[in-house]
Every structure is written in structure tokens, then in C-alpha cells.
Image: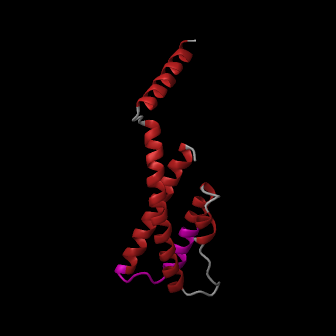
Amino acid sequence: MNEQSYRKLKQLRAALAALADSMERSLNWSIQRGTGGVSARSYRGLQASIAQLLPDDVYITQGLVLELPEDASDSLHFSTTLMLVKQLNAYLRELIKDLDAQFTSEQNPTTIRDLKRKLAEMTGELEDDED
């Protein structure tokens, strides 16, 4: 995964967390009635965007797809969507935690070898700029 995809994934995870928070508030305040369809559409859009970034992740591309019958009740839409939102959010939290370590170590060298490589890259960049 490149840095641009990594940043996009973090943005999508933030949107997913916001959806989860909104849905939980609706549930806690007992105002979820009429919000199942909207929640489902939001989730489908986020899940599809995340699946595009992680096309080889079968859990995301197949396991977390929201599939409901056409005549499903609003309540079923809401509860199923909330379950999937929570699963995807938890999964991405762990995935991004691993990616954070990878991208942080690339940008903030911690070993002598990393420092030497970074210094060589910077020196090479400076030499290229002088030409």
C-alpha cells in the first residue's frame, strides 16, 4: 500500500467511525426509526470505497458486504448495518495500527541503518537540486 492509499484508508475509517457513533446515538436515544435506509446507503458507499483500496482482502470485499432482501424492514436495515459498521471499524482499527507502524518507521528512522539510508536519500536530493 502506498502512502496516498494509506491516508485515504484513514479518512474512510474516520467516516466509518462517525457513522458508527451516529448510529449508536440514534439507538441510545431511541430515534433510529426511519434511519435504516440512510445508514445502509452510507455503509455501502464506505465499504465499497474501502474494498477498492484493499481488493485482495476477502473479509472486506466479500464478508462485510451488506446484503438484505428488498422488502427488509427499516429496523433490519439499521441493526444489520450497525453490526457490519462495528465489525469493519474494529477490523480497520487493527489494520491501520499495523500500517501506522510501517509508515511511521519509514518517515521517522529509528535504526542506524534507517538514518544512513535517510541521510543518503537527503544528500542525493540535495545533489540533484544543485544540478
| 38 is higher (above) or lower (below) than 94 | below
Q: Is residue 42 magenta?
A: yes
Identify the residue at image location x=47%, y=65%: 89
Which of the pair 19/86 is nearer the observer? 86
Is 9 placed left or right of 67 in the picture? left
Identify the residue at image location x=44%, y=40%: 105
The single residue placed furthest to the left in the displayed view is 29
Colour convention = secondary structure
Q: How many numbered marks, from 0 up?
A: 0
Span colored in magenta: 28-44
The x and y percentages for residue 1 are 58, 47
Which of the pair 50/111 is nearer the observer? 111
The x and y percentages for residue 106 are 47, 38
Is 131 placed left or right of 35 in the picture? right
Which of the pair 19/33 is nearer the observer? 19
Which of the pair 100/66 is nearer the observer? 100
Q: Quadrant of residue 52?
A: bottom right
| 30 is higher (above) or lower (below) than 108 | below
Identify the residue at image location x=58%, y=65%: 60
Q: Quadrant of residue 31?
A: bottom left
Image quadrant for the C terminus? top right
Is 57 placed left or right of 11 in the picture? right
Identify the residue at image location x=48%, y=54%: 11
The x and y percentages for residue 101 are 44, 47
The single residue placed furthest to the top in the displayed view is 131
Q: Is residue 123 magenta?
A: no
